[in-house]
Amino acid sequence: MRTETQQRSECVFSNFLDLLGDKWTLLIIRDLMFFEKHEYREFLSSPESIATNILSDRLKKLVVANVIAERVHPENRSRKFYYLTTKGKELLPIMIEMAKWGAVHFPELERMQGVYEKLRANTSEKLCAQVLKKLSAWEKENL
Amino acid sequence: MRTETQQRSECVFSNFLDLLGDKWTLLIIRDLMFFEKHEYREFLSSPESIATNILSDRLKKLVVANVIAERVHPENRSRKFYYLTTKGKELLPIMIEMAKWGAVHFPELERMQGVYEKLRANTSEKLCAQVLKKLSAWEKENL
């Protein structure tokens, strides 16, 4: 007979949410994916005002899970930058579908109107390709 | 100048996560979407062992947000059943993309192997259509 813990770990959604089902975690991924943020202080400056202890904790967890990786900043050894791994970049279709859902169900968000237009005008595949291209360009320059 | 709260509410991801970025909330949606669970006691019996107070709270919030709806059980007025609204069913592409990600990155989950095979063998569109068909069949019988 299985214990609760074993049963729990056997559902893909349960595992996904244990790893990523935390608001702050997904906002860090959003910043890396769409806003070209790569440094601790850049995540801190996002409008959601993440607390420093939560930010440090979530960055560590994401590195351990191999969703993001870190590297010492070439210009200053006391700074680090973070970037999405392949595993992290593969979260993109999920984020795109979330944004598409929001375009339908949060139509009132003023600042999103430009993004919503793009979401309506393009397939998920095309949107993913555009973001991946931007991420690759950053990687070529920085890694 | 905008306040933090106003800024926060202007990102589609932030709004999405405020509404649905909670592990228990998404597990209830999973149960409604894939496991044909529609009653309080059925959600309680899921292997993640949700607490009764959390379950009641999340069901209420989802009803208020019009992601799910409730109805008095035809056979017993003290029972209720819950079902996904159109808005709730439109979360399906997000859930399918999450499961597809898990099929790649949680390959070790034994109980998921059958589902993983289906996920690999079918497009997201086809998988969504299959689930929607099952949900419609339930609705025809019960609503």
Image: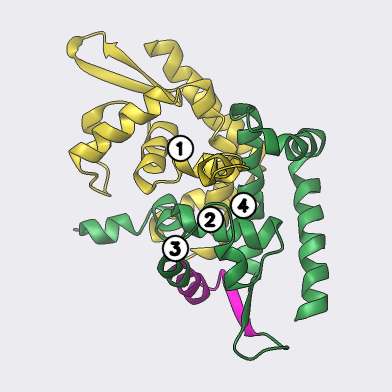
Chain colours: A green, B yellow
Q: Residue at x 48, y 76 (%)?
A: A64
A10 vs B127, left or right, is left
Q: Which residue is mark 4?
A: B120
Numbered disc 4: secondary structure: helix
Badge 1: residue crowd in 10 Å (few <14, some 14–19, many ≥20): some
Q: Judging from the image, what secondary structure is the residue with disc 2 in?
A: helix
Mark in front: 1 vs 3? 3
Element type at mark 1: helix
Nearer to me, A70 or B100: A70
CB-based contact (under 8 Å), mark 4 and mark 2: no
Q: Position of residue A134 (x, y in %)?
A: 80, 62
Q: Which residues make up the magenta segment?
A: A58-72
Indicate the amino acid at tag 4: Arg
Residue sitting at 45 percent across and 37 percent down? Answer: B19
Q: In whole angstroms, how far apart are the C-alphas of marks 2 and 3? A: 15 Å
Badge 1 is on which residue? B19
Q: Quadrant of residue B81?
A: top left
To which residue does mark 2 refer? A26
The answer to whether A15 appears left or right of A83 in the picture is: left
Quadrant in which the N terminus of chain B appears: top right
Magenta span includes A69? yes
Q: Nearer the viewer, mark 4 or mark 1?
A: 1
Looking at the picture, how far across and down is residue B37, in whole percent? Answer: 33, 30
